[in-house]
Amino acid sequence: MTDDTSDASESIDADGPDDDEVVRTAAEAAEGIVFKHYDQSAVTDLDITVTFEEGVLDVDVYLNAPEDADPDREAVAQEAVETAGEAVDELFAE
């Protein structure tokens, strides 16, 4: 006898993106937003941390750019986080 619940989860996991693809997609999307707004030479430090565990995506963006940069660093970091989440949503919708 098989457990239908376990079989269903396995088939969902097999059809969807794997965890590495989710993390890579989110990180690339976040990085793309940062460098859309700033020249790479203006960014002195960028750290994008992405985890995807048990269906939960966590994105953290640390951005060090000039304080007088336009747009605001915090706004760009927030946009990067939001865009990463949207990119993963689109990945699962495919």
Image (tube, rainbow, N blue to C red):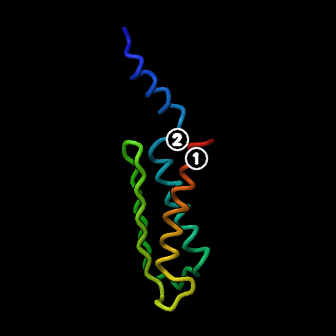
What number of labels is visible?
2
Q: Which disc is residue 12 wearing?
A: none
User: What secondary structure is marked by label 1?
Assistant: helix
Discs 1, 2 touching: Cβ within 8 Å? yes
User: What secondary structure is marked by label 2?
Assistant: loop
Please determine whether, in this image, residue 4 is positioned above or below residue 54.
Answer: above
Q: Residue at x 42, y 17 (%)?
A: 4
Q: Residue at x 41, y 43 (%)?
A: 55
| Badge 1: residue crowd in 10 Å (few <14, some 14–19, many ≥20) | some
Q: What percent of the width, then of the height, locates residue 2?
A: 38, 12
Please determine whether, in this image, residue 67 is positioned above or below residue 53.
Answer: below
Q: Tell me the quadrant of the picture where the N terminus can be found.
A: top left
Q: Amino acid at mark 2?
A: Pro
Q: Tell me the quadrant of the picture where the C terminus can be found.
A: top right
| Residue that mark 2 sits on | 17
Q: Amino acid at mark 1?
A: Leu
- Indicate the quadrant where residue 46 lies: bottom left
Please determine whether, in this image, residue 46 is positioned above or below residue 42.
Answer: above
- Indicate the quadrant where residue 54 lies: top left
Q: What percent of the width, then of the height, locates residue 16?
A: 53, 37
| Badge 2: residue crowd in 10 Å (few <14, some 14–19, many ≥20) | some
| Residue that mark 1 sits on | 91
Q: What percent of the width, then of the height, locates residue 44?
A: 45, 83
Q: Nearer the viewer, residue 44 or 76?
A: 76
Q: Residue at x 54, y 73 (%)?
A: 34
**Separation (CA) of disc 1 from disc 2:** 7 Å
